[in-house]
Amino acid sequence: MSTLATVPALQPARLEETLRRFAALSEPGPGVSRLAYTRLERQAHDLFASLLADLGIAAYTDAAGNTIGELAPDAEPRPGAIGTGSHLDSVPQGGAYDGTVGVVAALAVAAAASAGPRPRHRPWRFVAFAAEEGARFGQACNGSRIVAGLTGAADLRQLTDRTGTTMAAAMTECGLAPERVETARWDPRDWRAFVELHVEQGTVLEHRRVPVGVVDTVSGSTRLRVCLTGVASHTGGTPMDNRRDALAAAAECVLDCERLAVAATDVNTRITVGALTVEPGAITIIPGRVVFTVDVRETDYGRQRAAAHAVGQRCRTVAARRGVDVEVEELADTPPVSLSREVAAVAHAAATALGLPAEVLASGASHDTQQISRLMPAGIVFVPSRGGLSHSPGEFSTADQVAAGAAVLLETMYRLDATA
């Protein structure tokens, strides 16, 4: 690697220590549990702001809960900021790397750029987005959706978690101002480009032994909630041919979701049932109501919508045959996006200049940059994930891998800074 490998801010041990500090902010139990719009997520944002302050960079929190710091140019100024960052919330019992790697890399870039000899002609912004994970409220990338103008105050009153708490109420409990989220929108004229570093959450880089990935496409996601209502009755008193068992119907629907994905003509079609609730939930009672979620992912929006429609049709067919009622509700719908070819080319050239082979690949997971790309040229740099594990306590990338990704991120930002 080039002399960037000797930059103190990019040293693996320093990055690893910062990752540990964020990982400590978690609910008890396996992995990291730091859900969207909770006290722990806000503590992680406070730590991010504190670490920026240690570098002499002031940060602020917008009405959506995003935390943003800015490093002013130190050479002849040019219009349009260069940005980087990711998110700090997690899924329940998730890992210490998803999202956090991108925030820690942003801090490393901030430290290296503020101390480095190379000129910066544009403002450099460092962002920790709020509520990227959809685990709590069903919709993903909320902080970035708000700054992109895709989610407004009215939407926040409609999104709820399992307890019935609305996103707006959760934000208020955290000291945020959901009624003012429109003030958090970004003006594209203020920006030049945005680059996010993230763990791959897949095995392409690991299997091909490539240290860096440059993302060209991010898959879309359609999220559904399916509610099946049968009749709860005694398990011993109700004959098998006279049952309206909501769980048996749900089991068939879940397997049909899997069959749809397996039979799809495109390998990028992924359909997952990730949460299922059974009521009344007693050993001697036939389940009368089951609610489950479906996540449909695709890199082609037409196929994504067709797959989501097919899921709904299969569930209705099963319900009709089994004599149960069904409701299929769409929770969220995010189309796939093609990221900036310019930013991808710059990132690829940056990796090459550092002596790091880079693979161009698609992302099957959603990212904040997917939303930001609607406002400006945007890109994503991947580092390998061991075993492809993510959203799991087993999630892992080595400190050396993270350091290599941070070096590519820094070089990419310098190159974008220098371009017209």
Image (cartoon, rainbow, N blue to C red):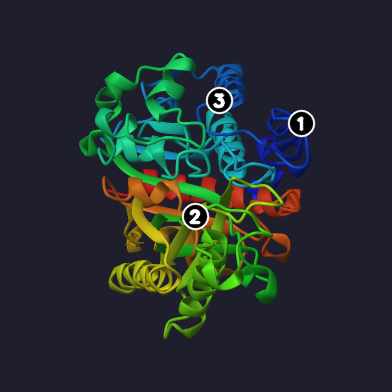
Question: Can residue 221 be seen in this snapshot?
Answer: no
User: In the shown orientation, is residue 364 left or right of residue 62?
Assistant: right
Residue 214: percent from the left, percent from the top?
49, 63
Q: Element under label 2? A: loop
Residue 268: percent from the left, percent from the top?
46, 74
Residue 125 tag number: none
Residue 218: percent from the left, percent from the top?
41, 61
Residue 261: percent from the left, percent from the top?
48, 76
Q: Which is nearer the eye, 366 or 204?
A: 366
Q: Could you give the CA–CA distance between mark 1 and mark 3, rounded to whole angstroms?
A: 14 Å
Foreground mark, 1 or 2, reads 2
Foreground mark, 2 or 3, reads 2
Q: Earlier in the sequence, mark 2 or mark 3?
A: 3
Circles 2, 3 touching at the beta carbon (< 8 Å): no
Residue 28 tag number: 1
Q: Which is nearer the eye, 291 or 375?
A: 291
Residue tagged 3 = 38
Q: Could you give the CA–CA distance between mark 2 and mark 3, rounded to whole angstroms?
A: 37 Å
Q: Is residue 44 above or below residue 197?
A: above
Q: Earlier in the sequence, mark 1 or mark 3?
A: 1
* Residue at x 25%, y 26% (from the top left corner): 182
Residue tagged 2 = 231
Q: Element under label 3? A: loop
* Residue at x 38%, y 48% (from the top left corner): 416
> How packed is label 2: few (under 14 Cα within 10 Å), some, or many (20 or more)?
some
Q: Could you give the CA–CA distance between mark 1 and mark 2, rounded to whole angstroms?
A: 38 Å
Amino acid bearing label 1: Pro
